[in-house]
Image (cartoon, helix red, strand yellow):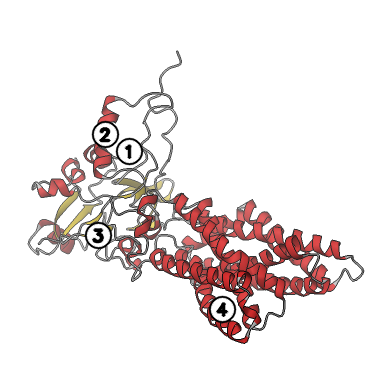
Amino acid sequence: MNPKANGQLQKEWGWLIAAYLFLGGVGAGAYTIAAINSFMGESLEPSTVVGLWIGFPALLIGSLFLIADLGTPKNAVLAGMKPGSSWIARGTWIISTFMVLSLIHLILHVFMGIGETAGGRTILSVVAVAGIAFAVGTMAYTGILLGASKGIPFWRSGVVPVVFVISAVVTGHFTIALGMVLWGGGAVAAESFRLMAAEAAALVVIEVLAIFFFLHEAYKLPDPRESAERILKNRMFVIGYFALGLGLPLVLMLLVSLGMADAGKSTILGVVAVGSILGLVGGLILRQAVLISGALPTLNMAGFEFRRIARPKEPKAGIGLLPPS
Amino acid sequence: MPRYGMAIDLKRCYGCYACSMACKTANHTPPGVFWARILKGEVGTFPNTTRQALPVLCMQCEEPSCLEVCPTGATIKLDNGIVIVEKDKCMGCKYCMMACPYGARYSVESWESYFPEGLPLSPYEEFTKKAWEEKSGVGVATKCDFCREKIADGKEPACVETCPAKARTFGDLDDPTSEISVLIKHHRGEVLLPEVGNKPKVYYLAPR
């Protein structure tokens, strides 16, 4: 029997990239929901405004996280040079276009208020359609970026973009819910929060199914299986994401939408806020856990499996150590 | 124009790490960076076990996934098939490191001393750091380039020159009469992770 030979975990992408992917998803998800609302006739006006407010800043801050992770940020202006083959280059164009569209939408809708007239509504609809297309592109990009990495078998799955798109919509929805509680809670009817909670619960159930499918697929091959086993042993993933980031928000949102008939509005707002914050933290943990569980493939040759040597970032303690004086 | 490649005879390699050391000396790589590495594998159950060394370096792939994903065009393939990084174009996104299934790429944030904290760089480290920054540098992706400066001078890569077991053969894969082509043909040279589809140009001769 061959001894177990593990692939080495990737160490290069960590929290900064996770935050970039998370905020990209949050901004695009929130904008998509807001733009659909806008396109459908603004049935829930505050959620549209809150969603539009979230889109552009989230992407802007997310991009700063990416730039902070770059080894040579001054060359970031070259990032879109090869959109023919590189997903980072494509992503640069997709995100840049989305940021411009979401900013235009925000200015037209919130600051200029052109939605009051029929002509203005037409313009907003055109911007919304284009914005939604690029927002969906942004959500998918955050997953495809990983899915296109040939060096990490765990990420190299068509399910990763699906999971990230669903998580983006979920976290975008939670952000809007939280934003409504913080800025517009008093003016919004409790019934609207119950409706949002029901939507959030349904979206979380879809995300749970997607995560199960992703891990199920990963278990089919040796290298991805090793990463899947690793992620399932990761307390941050199991407790922080699965229990507190998905399970508890699901329970809380179900409670708001189906129960709490006699609860006051402030209680409902509090429960929605707590559920949303937990869901958002869960979304960030999901991305970080997927990143740090990615491992290089095991090399096989002539019946042998080869373990990779470590790539220590710090010199090993003891090398060249001088005797204590 | 030749199309350079390498054949490594696993029957000859005994994992002495001379190639790793020669590479570090020739390319002035900082601590933690090993363009030429040795992996160790083991099969069997005690007492019937066998160990095998596997030298690994950049495979100089025919279809390099690192080149595909590079957003700035910093990674290029030369006419002789060697894949290099143009450090002035690299933004250090590390996507190529995620794309390379062989783990052949490195990026360092700073040039750290081999010695414990607080000690100044030794004169050798000062020299090495300067040489490294001229060729590669910090904050950018780096990788083995088959010692292309040595090749230009008509020499062989440092790992090939130094291998005491003569396990490595470097040469032109397009020349059917070259030693490397003959070895690969006669010993049915294999590549690592052929299923990935990168078409590596480093071949392994199995220890049969």
Instruction: Kindly indicate whether the residues beneath marks 1 and 4 are on one polypeptide chain.
Output: no
Outermost residue, right side: A262
* Near-viewer residue (A302 or A18): A18
In the picture provided, is A199 more to the left or to the right than B88?
right
Mark 3 — on which chain does it sit?
Answer: B
Which numbered tag is attached to residue B128?
2
Which numbered tag is attached to residue A128?
4
Q: Residue at x 37, y 25 (%)?
A: A320
Pinpoint residue A310: horizontal percent, then vertical percent.
42, 44
Q: Where is mark 1, residue-wise? A: B30
Amino acid type for the residue under numbered disc 3: Ile
In three-dimensional space, the C-alpha distance between marks 4 and 2, rounded to whole angstroms, equals 56 Å
Q: Which numbered disc, 2 or 1, marks the residue that appears first in the sequence?
A: 1
Instruction: Kindly indicate whether the residues beneath marks 3 and 2 are on one polypeptide chain.
Output: yes
In the picture provided, is A71 more to the left or to the right than A187?
left
In three-dimensional space, the C-alpha distance between marks 3 and 1, rounded to whole angstroms, equals 23 Å
Amino acid type for the residue under numbered disc 1: Pro
Amino acid type for the residue under numbered disc 2: Thr
Which numbered tag is attached to residue B76?
3
Mark 1 — on which chain does it sit?
Answer: B
Q: Choose mark 1 or mark 4, whichever is in front.
A: 4
What is the crowding at mark 4: few (fewer than 14 residues within 10 Å), some, or many (at least 20)? Answer: many
In the image, is residue B158 above or below residue B8? above
